[in-house]
Amino acid sequence: MVYCKCRNCGANLEIDENDYMPGCRETEDVNCPKCDKIATSVFTSGFPVAREIDKMPII
Ligand SMILES: [Zn+2]
């Protein structure tokens, strides 16, 4: 799980990379659920899913 801000609208996003196959990773674009544009890119073997959150968690 990674946390970032959408580079278009600035929404706080929680991204589940669905990364289950080490060694098969590639860069996938993540669509923002709020503005429907590309929010960021992650390095994963699966299909990342983003959801908007109210606040960034304190890590
Ligand atoms: Zn956005």
Image (cartoon, grey):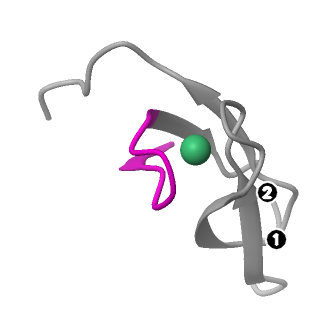
N-terminal-most mark, 1 or 2? 2
Residue 21 locus on image (x, y percent)? 82, 68
**Amino acid type indicated by mark 1:** Ser
Q: Which of the 4 quarters of the picture holds residue 53?
A: top left
Disc 1 target residue: 45
Q: Which mark is residue 30?
A: none
Mark 1 and mark 2 residues within 8 Å of each other at the beta carbon? yes
Q: Residue at x 72, y 33 (%)?
A: 33
Q: Residues within 10 Å of mark 1 (few under 14, many from 20)?
A: some
Q: Residue at x 84, y 84 (%)?
A: 24
Q: Quadrant of the C terminus?
A: top left
Q: Quadrant of ligand 1?
A: top right
- Secondary-structure class at tag 1: loop
From the viewer's side, name the closer residue of 48 and 52.
Answer: 52
On whether residue 5 falls in the magenta region, the answer is yes
> What stretch of residues is rendered in magenta?
1-12
Residue 43 locus on image (x, y percent)? 63, 76
From the viewer's side, name the closer residue of 22 and 16.
Answer: 16
The reply, left or right, for residue 30 in relation to residue 46 is: left
Vertical order, 8 against 44 (above or below): above
Residue 49 locus on image (x, y percent)? 76, 41
On whether residue 26 falls in the magenta region, the answer is no
**Amino acid type indicated by mark 2:** Tyr
Disc 2 target residue: 20
Rounded to the nearest whole Å, what is the CA distance between mark 1 and mark 2?
7 Å
Residue 46 locus on image (x, y percent)? 86, 61
How many numbered marks appear?
Answer: 2
From the viewer's side, name the closer residue of 10 and 1.
Answer: 10
